[in-house]
Amino acid sequence: MQYLRMYTVCVYIANKLVKVMSRSVKKAQEQYALSTSVSCTQSDTEASVIAGDDTKENWAPIEELHALGIAAADTKRLRESGIFSIQGVLMQTHKDLGQIKGLSEAKVDKILDAARKHSQPGFMSGITALERRQRIRRISTGCSDLDTLLGGGIESMAITEVFGEFRSGKTQLCHTIAVTAQLDGSRVAYLDTEGTFRPEKIGPIAERYKLDPTVTLSKIAYARAYTHEQQIELLAAAAEQMSEKKFALLIIDSLTALFRVDFTGRGELADRQQKLGQHLASLAKLADEFNIAIFVTNQVMAQVDGAAMFTADPKKPIGGHILAHASTTRLYLRKGRGNNRVAKIYDSPSLPEAEATFAVGEQGVCDAEE
């Protein structure tokens, strides 16, 4: 009789869990269905290019630590060091915080304790993780097939890398998503390391989506970097703006160009990879902290070893394993016929290996030409 009661209780609990998980999965599917793509003929009123619940902020201002006993002078020092949220504090190591001028070891311990009390980091259930994933927003690429390939568009809280040789459509894609990311009123940060940003390209793309070209340009925070050190420092400036205004996207075109220039030869390779890894870690933290999409372009190099003889396409992306592990989704672009380009999922934790064809034109990236 006792075993029968235990069995009945277990069945009851199992049924409850199934119902809860079913509701969560159904809600996730509904959110995914919202991430419909934009074709060349659709306007911003006909498509939902950014999906997800962006009413909930994923971060808390650093000033909220004042209520937990942290002095205003110390939070000012954190801000001057590029840390603008409590989540940003928890993403730093004790060593990094200790290197901030004016923060003693005792102050660092106190700040970390206060941040932990505020945010209570730790393990969460799979259901909570699923609900957190529902905050993800997806940004349309401008091509319906490419959006489908990416599961609805370029997702936030992730690093999306596109690589390919010249004229494969990388910068055209950057210009297009700099506009589509604004369809919900958000802003875009654009970090240019190769001098390829063309503001005059934004106008025709904005008109395609029935947006005002001047307003669209005003919502793009643009910066030109000439050294890898400038590139790294500009992230802190971007984080400061994101703590004050709503951003949906950070574009870096291209991620590796300046690292290739500033570090030459095998003797500097280890130092280059270490700094590139730290830069990518900062990007990943920024994506999680402010729920933004990180979109980076990358260059390729020819494979000249013996294996190249047996490879159909002997080109591979720059950055090695450091970049391969840091990127959430990697997209390989290559030229097609005429204005068409082909995108292939090179690596992704959730997307199958597949291809999509898109076209580039005066109004940016759109559906492929027949």
Image: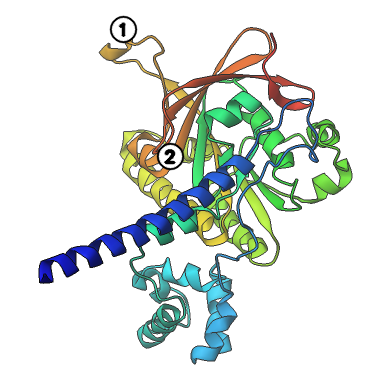
Q: In the rendering, at what x and y percent does residue 20 appear?
A: 42, 59
Tag 2's secondary structure?
loop
Q: Could you say which quadrant of the image residue 365 lies in?
A: top right
Residue for point 79% across, 36% down: 202
Question: In the drawing, does residue 36 fall left or right of residue 217?
Answer: left
Residue for point 46% across, 27% down: 345
Question: In the drawing, does residue 37 fall left or right of residue 264?
Answer: right
Residue under numbered circle 1: 309
Image color mode: rainbow
Q: In the rendering, at what x and y percent does residue 127 appear?
A: 40, 58
For residue 1, the mark is none
Pick whichever, 264 or 213, lies toward us. 213
Amino acid carrying mark 1 in the image: Met
For residue 263, the mark is 2
Question: In the drawing, does residue 22 fall left or right of residue 125?
Answer: right
- Quarter of the image with the N terminus in it: bottom left
Residue neighbourhood size for the residue with mark 2, other residues' Cα within 10 Å, grouped as few (<14), some (14–19), many (≥20): some
Q: Is residue 179 above or below residue 133?
A: above
- The answer to whether residue 12 shows anywhere in this view is yes
Tag 1's secondary structure?
helix
Kindly report the distance in space between the C-alpha atoms of the residues bearing marks 1 and 2.
Answer: 29 Å
- The answer to whether residue 76 shows anywhere in this view is no
Q: Could you say which quadrant of the image residue 226 lies in?
A: top right
Amino acid carrying mark 2 in the image: Phe
Residue for point 49% across, 29% down: 331
Q: In the rendering, at what x and y percent does residue 335 appear?
A: 58, 14
Residue neighbourhood size for the residue with mark 1, other residues' Cα within 10 Å, grouped as few (<14), some (14–19), many (≥20): few
Discs 1/2, front: 1
